[in-house]
Amino acid sequence: MTGRGTNWVDEALREHEEHTAAEQAAAGGAAAGDTAARDAGAGGRAATPSDREQQVLDRIDRARRRRPRIREERITMSHGAGGKASRTLVEALFLDAFRNPLLEPLEDAAQLQVGGARLALTTDTYVVSPLFFPGGNIGDLAVNGTVNDLAVSGATPLYLSAGFVLEEGFPVADLTTIVASMTAAAAAAGVQVVTGDTKVVERGKADGCYINTAGVGVVEHDLAMGAATARPGDVVIVSGPVGDHGVTIMLARGELDIEADLTSDTAPMNGMIAGLLAAVPGVRAMRDATRGGVATILNEVAVAAGVGVVVEENQIPVRAQVRGAAELLGIDPMYVASEGRMVAIVDGEQADRALASLRAHPLGEQAAVIGHITADSPGIVLLKTAFGGTRIVDLLVGDPLPRIC
């Protein structure tokens, strides 16, 4: 690795200094000798940038293999951000408590065998702020998000539930608008809302309206998909420009003196995905790029499959408005949520066929190959930057854009 790569090595080594000291103490000094030997390199030579980079990669791999443990005494906003804190909460608490073979893959929907049918089941809760934003509102966001979770799991979405938590004093006119949006979104996606629930809480105990949706779909193909099935030689495809939704929500809050001609990309992707699955038997995995964005999905693939992921920064489609706003906010568009975009891992030999299928659909007109799967650096996502360097793309710890979905 060249160019700006040395900078991230130094930063990562400083970041892991505390872990190194703990490891050395636990090993009774043996780890200190191992570290010195690695620093010296083979034959007693001085450590090179490549040696130090490998140290960082090895240390990250060891850290990820440790049993997850919640260190905080109270829940923070980071636990809902889709990054490291979220994953730790899920794995250390919920997965540990509810562990079973259907839950363990941690995909967007569980795969169920019911009689002779193969079904997919998913659930999600929406707490977006503001409730109404350019391009949509919490209602169509809830329907589209659940439809997309089923679709990227390879299922044909059929039925949804809808649960509402309403704050005392919430305007009936706003609720009517939200429900109308849900009705229209369900019709567009070809699904039905068939059951639901409503709860009202005291004024000040909720932010107007929260919505929970669950969805059921049928899997009508024999593909065995999932993040763990990615293999070297596969390509990484995104279905269109990333980050539209997250940046739109931030600007809609009016807290920043930034104006941009931008709307949320919330949309049902089941039609586009059905076309892809019909045309390309080599689809390994799909995820919709919501909380945590593309970067989080790629890290999940790298860890689940034990592979490396290499992404070309220049190939990632990002609208100029999103890139500009993200630069002003100091965030990377790769971590910003979309609500009508997916990441697909596809057999490299079928990349052209996959692109053709996606681009034939209005939602996929700007689909692009942004990287590939490699056997090198398993569990790590590397970004080849526009400046010619390489850097690690890790899971975020904090939450740069809270309550976006």
Image: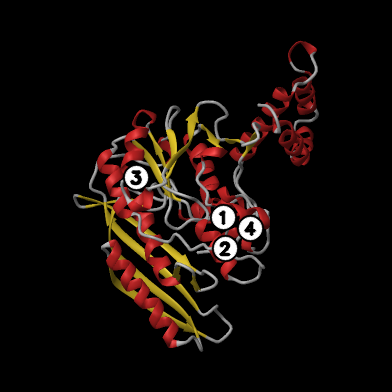
User: Which quadrant would residue 224 be assigned to in this image?
Assistant: top left
User: Which quadrant would residue 285 be assigned to in this image?
Assistant: top left
Q: Nearer the viewer, mark 2 or mark 4?
A: 2
Q: Which residue is mark 1?
A: 322
Q: Which residue is mark 3?
A: 358
SS at badge 1: helix
- In whole angstroms, how far apart are the C-alphas of marks 3 and 4? 30 Å
What residue is at 37 percent from the left and 32 percent from the top?
347
Q: Earlier in the sequence, mark 3 or mark 1?
A: 1
Q: Which residue is mark 2?
A: 260
**Taking the image as drawn, is residue 403 in sight?**
no
- In whole angstroms, how far apart are the C-alphas of marks 4 and 1? 15 Å
Q: Earlier in the sequence, mark 3 or mark 4?
A: 3
Q: Badges 3 and 1: C-beta atoms under 8 Å apart?
A: no
Q: What amino acid type should be assigned to the residue bearing mark 2?
A: Ala
- In whole angstroms, how far apart are the C-alphas of marks 3 and 1? 22 Å
Which quadrant of the figure contains the N terminus? top right
Spot occupied by residue 291 in the image (x, y as percentages of width and height): 52, 56
Q: Earlier in the sequence, mark 2 or mark 4?
A: 2
- In whole angstroms, how far apart are the C-alphas of marks 2 and 3? 27 Å
Q: Which residue is mark 4?
A: 400
Residue 354: assigned label: none
